[in-house]
Image (cartoon, helix red, strand yellow):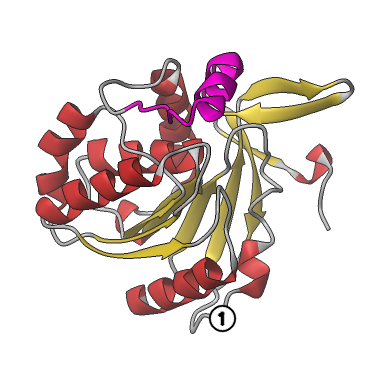
Amino acid sequence: MLDDENDLESLGPLKVLRVKGDPDAPTVVLFHGYGASAFDLYPIHEVLVTDQKFNWVFPHGHLSIPLMPGYLGRAWFPIDMAALEEAIRKNDFRNFADKDPEGMDIARASAYLMLEALGVPWNQLILGGFSQGAMLATDITLRNELMSKGLMILSGALVNETLWKDLAPKKSNLRFFQSHGEYDPILGYANAKKLEKLLRGSGLLGEFISFPGGHEIPAPVVQGISRYLNSLS
């Protein structure tokens, strides 16, 4: 298992973990969640059953986050952990739907530069991520003038609702995949369903997998990702 930053390569301002597949196949870019790293989502590509050998890029968050003594994670934008823990305690899930999370603009700019350095045509890119990485992937997909090949939203959330609602119709017929745990204590299920409704109402075509779990990627979701990627090939 890769777990050393020496395994990463630089693409623009970001470091990434790359897995090269068929040169003619699309490239999947998966942004990890808060406190994780480029290595966190890497195992997914090893267990998928796909007709094509996709190319994979796992970006490494530009922010270094102290999680516990002697251990640092990575992130795309800061999270007020005290406020989050209080929300979990009160069963009052946080909702970013009225605005961009602080620092999203910096993450977005870094991601765009990374994708530019990657050099893959936009229509051959499938962007996705987990948690805040899913928020970033969705934001990038909707904001870019070009149509990407796909979008994977794993335990993500609706943010900046007014802007996304305005941008989403321009991506009509884009096929997306979304999954969310019904008992997610970090990003609430209702918010995820609201995002699905916004995307479908704007003409995007997608599959939503719900599961009786929390903030995670269980086996049914992995199977769903395989189906989704095969549907794009």
Residue found farthest to the front: 90
Residue 2: where, in percent of width, then height?
81, 53
Which residue position holds label 1? 49
Q: Residue at x 48, y 27 (%)?
A: 110
Q: Which residues are magenta?
A: 77-96
Residue 200: where, in percent of width, then height?
16, 56
* Residue 86 drawn in magenta: yes
Q: Residue at x 49, y 48 (%)?
A: 129
Give the quarter of the figure containing the N terminus.
bottom right
Residue found farthest to the bottom: 51
Image position of 144 with respect to 17: above or below: above
Residue 221 in view in this figure: yes
Examine the image and state in which quarter residue 68 appears: top right
Residue found farthest to the right: 70
Q: Which of these two is toward me, 195 or 43?
A: 195
Relative placement, left or right, of 195 versus 4 is left
Relative placement, left or right, of 105 versus 193 is right
Give the quarter of the figure containing the C terminus.
bottom left
Relative placement, left or right, of 115 versus 10 is left
* Residue 151 drawn in magenta: no
Residue 118: where, in percent of width, then height?
49, 46
Residue 209: where, in percent of width, then height?
39, 65
Image position of 167 with respect to 160: above or below: below
Q: Which of these two is toward me, 88 or 174?
A: 88
**Residues packed near mark 1 inside 10 Å, few (<14), some (14 to 19) or many (20 plus):** some
Residue 23 in view in this figure: no
Question: SS of the residue at dot 1?
Answer: loop
Q: Residue at x 55, y 19 (%)?
A: 86
Examine the image and state in which quarter residue 45 appears: bottom right
